[in-house]
Amino acid sequence: MPNLDETHDPARRSWVESANDPATDFSIQNLPFGVFCRKGSKESGRIGVAIGDQVLDVGACLNAGLLNGLDSETNAALQRDSLNEIMGLGRAAWRSVRRAVGELLDSKRAKPQAAVVIPQSAVEMLLPARIGDYTDFYASIHHATNVGSMFRPDNPLLPNYKHLPVGYHGRASSIVVSGTPITRPMGQTVTSDAGPPTFGPCKLLDYEMELGVFVGRGNAMGTRIDMKNVAEHLFGMVIVNDWSARDIQKWEYQPLGPFNAKNFGTTISPWVVTMDALEPFRVPLQPRAENDPQPLDYLQSRENWGYDINVEVSIASALMRERNLPPHRVSRGNFRDMYWTLAQMLVHHTSTGCNLRPGDLLASGTISGPTEDSRGCLLERTWRGQNPIDLPDGTQRKFLQDGDNIAMSAAASQGLRRIGFGMCAGVITTG
């Protein structure tokens, strides 16, 4: 059963009026964490909480004595320029902050005299954490089957897929926050499987619609995280766009997997939605097929670790933006359609004794569902370019063109107050 308390009460309201709009991503039931600075300033990052169209300046609240019930260690962690330290304190600390912030913002409490909220339009969002390591998984069986069918029609899924969450180590240094332009990569590509290659701009640039989770409390090298303790180690989630150069990937990926086709840029949304905020939306994943193997014991849990989160991707070409045409939605899926859970990904990651650290990022891999419009990348959506997507400006897309703005959104809202993630967006530029 979900572990709910007063912070999840759907009737709760805030004195920040915009937070009470049913369409807002950032209701008082959400309270995601991020790191910001004021636009035009040279100040270092400050920890904030999104509330409606405002940002609660956590440091300013602490200086004014407005957050109650926090110990000195938690107070100190909240005055850093990243979330790493608070991530490392564990679930009891996270919950104490969520409760204190919720009480401060509750409509039953008088609005503080101190200036503690800033319009989101007046701030610049920074990466929420110093990301030491980044691992990308391949957890959607629909995505894996579709891609496998294109390249291995007789054997779409390799034998290991239904036994473990497949993943690869990504490049943490090229993770950027939403709004950062993405430069079209250069690389080796071939016209036939045997080569020879030529070097030039990627022609088959793609997005991948994913969700990611930040590691909270880490583990010592040589130890493993047990499934029963997973909640201490999962801090919160963001949207992830794992940009992919499909033509570069085709030539380089054998025998060791993704390399330059993935390392040139990964975009994340700036607000980290805590696992506690998403507690009401925990669900079982879609049932496995009757003849599928059950996970090994260390990957099994009595708890539901799936999440009912809708995810969407839209494209706005440069011409569409010039003509003030709205973005065109190209995909809509749900995170409950995954084959492996975030909990299983984290537990399997440490099963060898690999040490994870606060602020490490684990991404789900492309979120794809059983229908054509739920496929989470253009490789699948256009089936290797055979079925182009028509855009409102009269052009078509097999893969991304320069000037395209890709925007991803995600939200959980079934029968409760909406818990949104904000936006994860980037425009393709030339180098």
Image: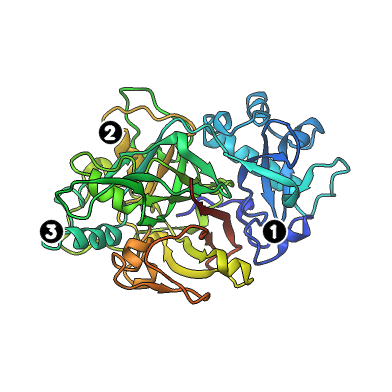
Q: In front: 176, or 361?
A: 176
Judge depth for marks 2 and 1 and give the one in front: 2
In which quadrant of the rendered view does residue 357 lie? top left
N-terminal of the pair, mark 3 or mark 2, is 3
Q: What is the residue that sits farthest to the right in this orientation?
A: 113
Q: In front: 187, or 34?
A: 187
Tell me how far mark 3 sits from mark 2, CA to CA: 28 Å
Element at badge 2?
A: loop
Name the spot of residue 268 as percent of width and height, x first. 51, 47
User: Label 2 near label 3: C-beta < 8 Å?
Assistant: no
Judge depth for marks 3 and 2 and give the one in front: 3
Identity of the residue drawn at 72% across and 37% down: 58
Q: Is residue 265 above or below residue 376?
A: above
In which quadrant of the rendered view does residue 421 lie? bottom right
Q: Residues within 10 Å of mark 1 (few under 14, many from 20)?
A: some
Could you tell me the amino acid type at mark 3?
A: Asn
Identity of the residue drawn at 68% across and 62% down: 11
Q: Which residue is mark 1?
A: 12
Element at badge 1?
A: loop
Residue 351 tag number: 2
Q: Horizontal placement of 6 versus 426: left or right? A: right
Could you tell me the amino acid type at mark 1?
A: Arg
Q: Residues within 10 Å of mark 2 (few under 14, many from 20)?
A: some
Name the spot of residue 98 as percent of width and height, x first. 63, 43
Name the spot of residue 335 as percent of width and height, x first. 41, 59
Could you tell me the amino acid type at mark 2?
A: Ser
Q: In front: 364, or 274?
A: 364
Q: Which residue is mark 3?
A: 155
Judge depth for marks 1 and 3 and give the one in front: 3
